[in-house]
Amino acid sequence: MSGRLGRVLQFHLRLYQVLGFHGLPLPGDGNPVRTRRSLMAWSLFLLISLSALVLTCLFSGDEFLYRGDMFGCANDALKYVFAELAVLAIYLETLSSQRHLANFWWLHFKLGGQKAGTQLSLRSEFQQFRRYLIFLYAMMCAEVAIHVGLWQVQALTHHMLLFWSTYEPLVWLTYLRNLQFVLHLELLREQLTALEREIGLLAEYSRFASGTGRSFPGFESFLRRRLLQKQRIYSHVYDMLKCFQGAFNFSILAVLLTINIRIAVDCYFMYYTIYNNVINNDYYLILPALFEIPAFIYASQSCMVVVPRIAHQLHNIVTDSGCCSCPDLSLQIQNFSLQLLHQPIRIDCLGLTILDFSLLTRMACSVGTYMIYTIQFIPKFGNTYM
């Protein structure tokens, strides 16, 4: 990575390097080739270590899995299996998608990033990344607070100690990977909103010139040059989106699936324990997970809704006044409109589904549907049926 990063962005990318999620050296790192090899070796080590941990938990004779009955054991096993799926997707993609991630950051710096010689104040950087920071630290505080509160009111059994001491690190990895997606989407949204703002200014200039009849020689050529520049910027932003999808496609699917499966099986087990009068409150730990998928989808939707606003501002540019009436300008606007149509900002998951708010409805319906099935089959898990 070449360019200049703000302190907030530098700190959080360094955090992702420590977690093995970001395999690129940061600006200022000495010997970038050696640093990249070290980061890749660290990611591979974490992949092997975490996979070994999950296999140990699944096949050990100790109480990593709930031994009270088959239903609880299957629920715990499902959590470990899908956590392992997420670990494999995250680290294999980190190792294999270096080129896409490098291109993403190269385009980010090309479009502006942080200019050399400029230094934003820390307050300005916090304002710039406020959404990401709120999601990140709210999740961390909620997870810690719920754990501390839960173990004050519920006895920590041997099974719970073994299960949560091994499963909780996997939970944090999936959450932090999810928020790494949010960080990259926030950088995309920042570029799109800046483009919308600049095209809005061009529309205001054209309306002023049309309403007052005041302009300058070559005003129409000025508008055409500026629109051409904005088309090139949009093309780079679209390339950033493709690089983002190339760098994170499989892990997006795995992380969302892992979080969704955890919510689903905890909902099933919650009803199961209530039905059988089992004192168990650890299902409250799914509360932070309930906000992880909406956080990512909110960031995704925030990017996609900017493009219609860009098109609206584009068609607000006045082309039929006396000062700037020219078919070439209208043709330029039509060309930009076609570019928006053929290069849509569409954030999806391997082309399977668009990551917008309708996905939340479908997830809630799927969990609710299978909850009904679980309620119907709960009596089958009683001792008289076993």
Image: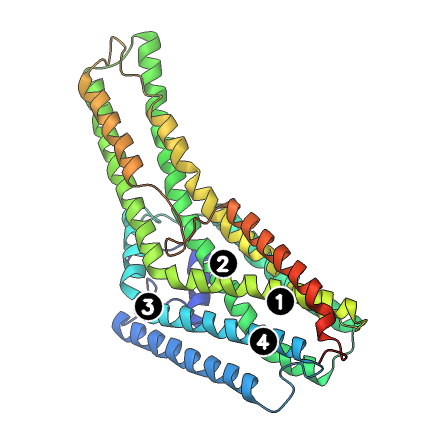
Q: Secondary structure at mark 2?
A: helix
Q: Identify the residue position indicated by label 1 in the image.
A: 265
Cα gap from disc 3 to disc 4, whole angstroms: 33 Å
Query: Which is nearer the eye, 366 or 99?
Result: 366
Cα gap from disc 1 to disc 3, whole angstroms: 43 Å
Q: Residue flagged by tag 2: what amino acid is it?
A: Leu
- Pick whichever of labels 2 and 3 is earlier in the sequence: 3
Q: Identify the residue position indicated by label 3 in the image.
A: 29
- Pick whichever of labels 1 and 3 is earlier in the sequence: 3
Q: Which is in the foreground here, disc 4 or disc 2? A: 4
| x 22%, y 32%: residue | 228
Q: Is residue 138 above or below residue 316?
A: below
| x 33%, y 23%: residue | 315
| x 65%, y 66%: residue | 266
Cα gap from disc 4 to disc 2, whole angstroms: 19 Å
- Pick whichever of labels 4 and 1 is earlier in the sequence: 4
Q: Identify the residue position indicated by label 4 in the image.
A: 167
Q: Which is in the foreground here, disc 3 or disc 4? A: 4
Q: Secondary structure at mark 1?
A: helix
Task: Return the mark for residue 194.
Answer: none
Q: Residue flagged by tag 4: what amino acid is it?
A: Tyr
- Pick whichever of labels 4 and 2 is earlier in the sequence: 4
Q: Position of residue 233 (x, y in %)?
A: 28, 40
- Determine which quarter of the picture holds residue 344: top left
Q: Residue flagged by tag 1: what amino acid is it?
A: Val
Cα gap from disc 1 to disc 2, whole angstroms: 23 Å
